[in-house]
Image (tube, rainbow, N blue to C red):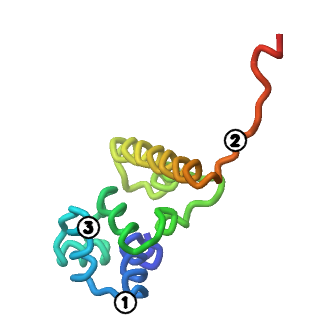
Amino acid sequence: MELNNSIGYKIKTIREEKGLNQNQLVDMLLEKNIRISRETLSKIENDNRTVSAIELAGICDMLGVSYDTFFNEINKNEDLTTLFRKKGKFSDETIEEIEVLQDMIKIFINQERIFNNEYNPKKREPLWKDF
């Protein structure tokens, strides 16, 4: 993965754009009961450690960005699972976990749309009308 497309690089860039240093972000995460050290955040930002889904959720919340900010590499016809399979560096177990995470993210996005009255499902004819 190119450094400028990595999640860690994007976290660092957004954090700096918000005028926060690593210690400040770590303190903000601690308020959300997400305990990582400044050193751990540094490793994440330098791609020497992966970020967990819980950590990423907290970072997104603290930085005021959505998950898709970190996954904009995905085109409309591709999902996270496909993207990670293309990278070729992940075990089948990791790919399965990514599928679960992706489904959870989709559910959260849909729940937010429902909450904000932005969800407009397609109207379908009742199944019994076909008979």
- Name the residue: 40% across, 85% down: 18
Q: Nearer the viewer, mark 3 or mark 1?
A: 1
- Find disc 3 in the rendering and name its residue: 49
Instruction: Please state if 42 lies on the left or on the right of 88 as rendered.
Output: left
- Number of numbered discs visible in the structure rendering: 3
Using the image, determine if residue 29 lies above or below residue 42.
Answer: above
Q: What element carries label 1?
A: loop
- Name the residue: 82% across, 16% down: 129
Instruction: Assign the N terminus to one quadrant of the image.
Output: bottom left
Instruction: Assign the C terminus to one quadrant of the image.
Output: top right
- Find disc 2 in the rendering and name its residue: 121
Locate residue 62: give its quadrant: bottom left
On residue 19, the disc is: 1
Instruction: Please state if 101 lies on the left or on the right of 73 as rendered.
Output: left
Give amino acid for label 3: Arg
Mark 2 and mark 1: span between their CA atoms? Answer: 40 Å
Using the image, determine if residue 55 lies above or below residue 78.
Answer: below
Q: Which of marks 2 and 3 is nearer the N terminus?
A: 3
